[in-house]
Image: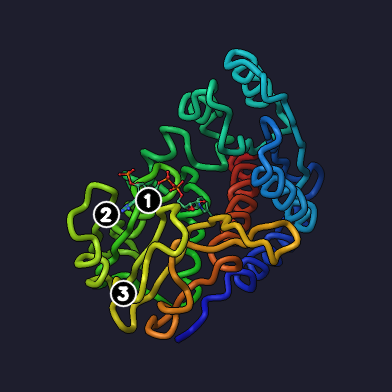
Amino acid sequence: MELIDGNQIAAAIAAELKAEVAAIQGRKPCIALVRVGEDPASVSYVKKKEKTAAEIGITSRIILPPVTISQPELFALLDALNADPDVDGILVQSPLPKHIDEVATFRRVSALKDVDGFNTLNLGKVAQEDDTGFVACTPAGIMELLRRTGVDLKGKHVVVVGRSLIVGKPIALLALQKKAGANGTVTICHSGTADLPALTRQADVLIAAIGRAEFVTAAMVKRGAVVIDVGINRVADPSKKNGYRLTGDVHFPSVAPLAGKITPVPGGVGPMTVAMLMKNTVKAFRLRAGQ
Ligand code: NDP
């Protein structure tokens, strides 16, 4: 079994971006990070994004509207960022409060600054295999992990568990693209799938994006499969200082010994998501600057 080290690969991408940003004369790329309210996971994600941006030399602008912000007020805030010539990328941290329409909010971000890749136009470009758009960071990060660890999807059966707009659907579309490294034969599973283990056991590459701690067990995995664990779940653990531990959607102790390659949680897909956000921000800067 080979452990896929997302931290190491993300650090390599950050180093590449740092050199690229250092070579930019004048104004550096800038990302606006919008976090509504104080959700503890969101607080830590935005902090991590701010820190990584600073390490690369990307300017970040942190905007922290109160949890009571109304939909029109949030739209107005995004409109101002869309119009701001010094802002290249805009990220609205999910989850948003219940009274805010998340999809409508993602749509409000200008397609040219949509570094999270959730805008309708950018999701559509993934389906059209048009590389001028922005690919959602987690799926883009998974493809980059596979590429940099020498996993070619051509001729492979890729089974994705989960069909969210953020992970499941876009990673399935990327794996399916008629491009080098992709060209997979893709099955997408969800809560309505009959006999899920029968399908996951056929996977040469199994991508778990379910949001259920340790859901995928050894009995669901073929020996030698590449297992990509997208899940980030907080499980109560009184022995930890903060009272919880992070775990993926895969039961790592039983699956790892039979997997060909596997991502750990933490330290697998998570760091890649942040790295790809930074990559998209530099791309947005270049597109806007006509470079
Ligand atoms: P969602 O809740 O939006 O989607 C979960 C998907 O899993 C749904 O399609 C759902 O099916 C499916 N599902 C749930 N239960 C079952 C089941 N019993 N059998 C089969 N399918 C099931 O989650 P996300 O896609 O947003 O996130 C998934 C996980 O990835 C979470 O743990 C999240 O924290 C993590 N994540 C990690 C990121 C990273 O950077 N590493 C980034 C984004 C997310 P249905 O559609 O039928 O409801």
Q: Are marks 1 and 2 in contact (CB under 8 Å)?
A: yes
- The crowd level at tag 1 (other Cα within 10 Å; few <14, some 14-19, many 20+) is many
The image shows residue 53 at horizontal and vertical percentages of: 74, 51
Which residue matches tag 2? 188
Which residue matches tag 1? 168
Foreground label between 3 and 1: 3
Residue 23 in sight in this render: no
Q: In what element is the residue under mark 2?
A: strand
Amino acid marked by disc 2: Ile
Q: In what element is the residue under mark 1?
A: helix
Which residue matches tag 3? 221
Q: CA distance from mark 3 to mark 1?
A: 18 Å
Which residue is rendered at x = 25% and y = 60% of the image? 186
- The crowd level at tag 3 (other Cα within 10 Å; few <14, some 14-19, many 20+) is many
Mark linked to residue 105: none
Q: CA distance from mark 1 to mark 2?
A: 8 Å
Which residue is rendered at x = 50% and y = 44% of the image? 134
Quarter holding residue 279:
bottom right
CB of mark 1 near ligand 1 (< 8 Å): yes
Q: Residue furthest front?
A: 238
Amino acid marked by disc 1: Gly
The image shows residue 218 at horizontal and vertical percentages of: 35, 76
The image shows residue 130 at horizontal and vertical percentages of: 38, 46
The image shows residue 54 at horizontal and vertical percentages of: 79, 52
Q: Is residue 217 above or below residue 83?
A: below
Q: In what element is the residue under mark 3?
A: loop
Upstream in sequence: badge 3 or badge 1: 1
